[in-house]
Amino acid sequence: MKNPYDVLRMKEQELLRVRKEIEALRIAARLLGAEDPAAAKGEGQPQLSRVVEMP
């Protein structure tokens, strides 16, 4: 049987990794959008929203 604290620690590490990946993707999306003239005007680009973490 796995130690619940070890499982919790692993899940917290996974969560931090995913948050970093999401932030990197947001930065990449902004950079890619800056290269596209239509995106600079806000045309044809979906709005990015932030995820709210629930307790």
Image: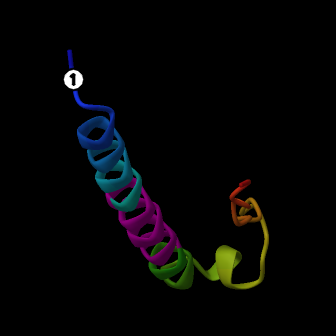
Give the colouring mode of the picture: rainbow
Residue 43 vertical position relative to residue 55 in the rendered view, above or below? below
Q: Residue at x 77, y 64 (%)?
A: 47
* Whole-percent x, y for residue 21 in the image: 37, 61
Which of these two is toward me, 40 or 14? Answer: 14
Q: Which residue is mark 1?
A: 2
* Whole-percent x, y for residue 1 in the image: 20, 14
Which quarter of the figure has residue 16?
Answer: bottom left
Mark 1 residue type: Lys
Residue farthest along the top direction in this orientation: 1
Residue 27 vertical position relative to residue 47 in the rendered view, above or below? below
Residue 29 vertical position relative to residue 1 in the rendered view, above or below? below
Q: Is residue 3 left or right of residue 29?
A: left
Which of these two is toward me, 46 or 26? Answer: 26
Find out whether residue 32 is within the magenta segment. Answer: no
* Whole-percent x, y for residue 35 in the image: 48, 82
Residue 7 vertical position relative to residue 34 in the rendered view, above or below? above
Q: Is residue 13 left or right of residue 43?
A: left
Q: Residue at x 39, y 54 (%)?
A: 18
Counting other residues with Cα less than 10 Å from the Cα at mark 1, is it few (<14), some (14-19), or many (20 or more)?
A: few
Q: Residue at x 36, y 43 (%)?
A: 8
Label total for image: 1
Q: Residue at x 47, y 74 (%)?
A: 32
Q: Name the quarter where the C terminus is drawn.
A: bottom right
* Whole-percent x, y for residue 25 in the image: 43, 64
Magenta-colored segment: predominant secondary structure: helix
Q: Which residues are magenta?
A: 17-29
